Image (cartoon, rainbow, N blue to C red):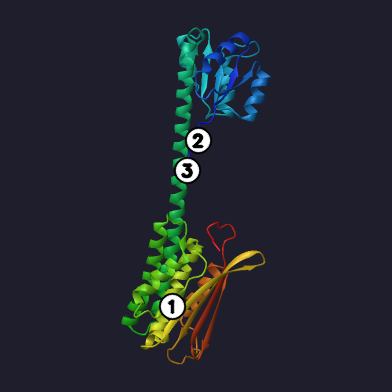
Amino acid sequence: MPLDHAPARARILLLEDSPLDAELIAEHLEKISPVPEIRRASSRAAYMEALDERDFDVILSDFSLPDFDGMAALELAAAQVPDVPFIFVSGVLGEEVAIESFRRGATDYVLKQRLIRLPAAVERALAEARERTERRRAEHQKELLVRELSHRVKNTMAMVMSIVRRTARNSGTVESYVENLSGRLRAMADAHALLFESNWTDAELLQVLERTITPHEQGNRFHVTAGPLIHLDPKAALALSLAFNELTTNAIKYGALSNADGQVAIDWSREEIDGEPWLALRWCEIGGPAVSPPHEDGFGTTLIQRSIRYELRGETVLDYAEAGLICDIRFPLSASDENIIS
């Protein structure tokens, strides 16, 4: 059974020139659990040194000090550590002064004659500070997500527009255009759906492959020898999804899946090249009609090669062996990706 983490001790900067008052304040703060750490500053110099270190969660300050006053201490704190709660602990604090201190950013004030209020005031100030910090963190995260989404949408739309234009240029009929374009867009949609399920962090290679080939599976004609578990970042998942779609479409039209006996074998491994992990994947067609190199590369071949080369810094080798097409795809996996499992 997991153990609960104990709450961290609050760190308090106490600006107080009177040792006796400082001792009384410390005694009342012992009612907070866990008991906070207290750093006392008794002069302007010590206070400014503590502000520079920024190693505290709340400031408690007397209002009247020998070499400067509490308002000056508040202004220094507001300038250097504006997110740290500032509480006056004073023997005398008139109503007008209290209102002015709040206007300048003070969180609360506690009279030394009523130090019994101090623990609750400190805990409340700390809770409010944590809430503000969490709210800012959430807003910052939201802003990052919106920027990332905007970036991805722009890239996706650019890719879609390119695919639409190139598919139209390489299609002889409206029917072939619709078929080819639908397949490519479906491959992109499937990859996006898979990434969405993982909060757009990564996708397993095997899942990307299965999303592409499963709709075309007839009689176990795909033989997948799963290699190590590989998690792909979004760019790699989209590039491979498009590559698998082009290879599958080509196999159905011209290759091993164009007859009743052909099969496709797929396997992959993880390699180390110059200390960097690479994915090596092979698509091998057997039992289909004899193949030969085309007179010129079609858009499907170009799409595979360019996406692997330019998007993933990898390479694609197509071998039009008489027994069937062999496609070798290799590209470096992110060295910072901790989700690659041998």
Residue designated by label 1: 223
**Amino acid at pointer 2:** His
- Which numbered disc, 3 or 2, marks the residue closer to the eye? 2
Image position of 151 with respect to 288: above or below: above
Q: Position of residue 169 (x, y in %)?
A: 41, 80
Q: Nearer the viewer, residue 54 or 219?
A: 219
Residue in the image at 60% along x and 60% along y: 335
**Amino acid at pointer 1:** His
Label 2 vs 1, first from the N-terminus: 2
Q: Residues within 10 Å of mark 2 (few under 14, many from 20)?
A: few
Residue 32 seen in this snapshot: yes
Residue designated by label 2: 5
Residue designated by label 3: 140
Label 3 vs 2, first from the N-terminus: 2
Q: Quarter of the image holding residue 273? A: bottom right
- Gap between marks 3 and 1 measured at Cα: 46 Å
Q: Quarter of the image holding residue 15? A: top right
Helix, strand or loop for disc 2: loop
3 and 1 marks in contact (CB < 8 Å):
no
- Locate the C terminus and report the quarter of the image it occupies: bottom right
3 and 2 marks in contact (CB < 8 Å):
no
